[in-house]
Image: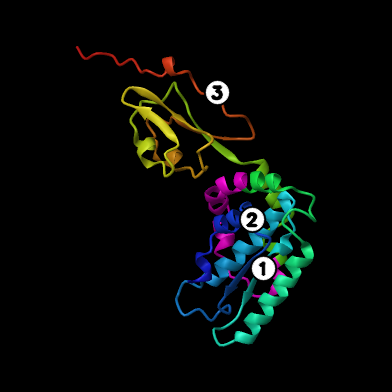
Amino acid sequence: MCSGRVDLGFVLRAFSNGVDGVFIGGCRLNECNYVTHGNFHALNMVLLARRIMEHIGLNPERLKIEFMSGAEANLFVEAVNGFVKQVKKLGPLGESEGLDQNDVKLKTAEITKLVPYIKMVNQDKLASRLKTPEEYDGLFTHDEIEKLFREVVSYYIDPTKCQACSICLKRCPVEAIAGAKNLIHIIDQEKCIKCGTCFEACPPRFGAVRKISGEPVPPTIPEEARTIARKSKA
């Protein structure tokens, strides 16, 4: 499997399940057999994941990526053995960081929900091709990650503008929108992955979906107030 298919969500899920370390092996950079050069994406994903790990209090040394060819078995063995020794030195996940398993699980679960949003915000950087290891450290900065989570967007359907057309409901990839004919639609904020599909799908003539950042999402209107009263045709 191409290393480019290793998703940020896979890494976070591994740590959420209590794995002490994650090792990713990929083909050498600029030696991709395909046009995708997925190993660059894997590298950028790891650089982003390591910054996120720092943000939630996990040691980024628990995540490592190495590049080698299929003929370099010795290099592979050395890299894996070296990483195993490193992880053993760090100890069980969370122990040296002062976090218990529940803390790790809760924090990684919250971040995992935001993976589609994180990838959307960082899509240009995730697609970049770094030329030297000196560039690695500057791709994602601590300040950028702090801002990323400080300014997470939310989406809210304005009950005064919703026409219950169901377009956003049908487009939502995680079924986070509830609604029916003549019933104002609402977004389940616990299910929402912040992808913005509803915002893009809502017809401009309605403009019912609001993009919110830096402020709380308004409370959901009660069930009994969601019915839309249509004017009967003469």
Comes first in the chain, label 3 or label 2: 2
Q: Magenta: predominant secondary structure element?
A: helix
x then y, percent, for residue 35: 45, 75
In the rendered image, the vertical position of residue 3 relative to residue 13, given as above or below: below
Number of the front mark, 1 or 2: 2
Q: Which residues are magenta?
A: 109-136
**Which secondary structure lies at badge 1?**
strand
**Residue shown at the point (56%, 83%) measured from the top left:** 69
Residue drawn at the location 69% of the way across and 67% of the way down: 136
Q: Quadrant of the C terminus?
A: top left
Q: Amino acid at mark 1?
A: Lys
Question: To which quarter of the image does residue 51 belong?
Answer: bottom right
* Mark 3 or mark 2, whichever is nearer to me: 2
Which residue is label 2 attached to?
15
* Residue named by callout 1: 64
Instruction: Examine the rendering and report whether any part of residue 218 can be seen.
Output: yes
- Figure check: 190 above or below 40: above
Residue ID at (55%, 58%): 10
The x, y position of residue 73, in whole percent, is 60, 85
Left or right placement of residue 184 versus residue 120 in this view: left
**Numbered badge on residue 171:** none
At x 62%, y 51%, the residue is 16
Q: Amino acid at mark 2?
A: Phe
Residue under label 3: 219
| Residue 110 is one of the magenta-drawn residues | yes
Q: Indicate which label's residue lies in the foreground, 3 or 1.
A: 1
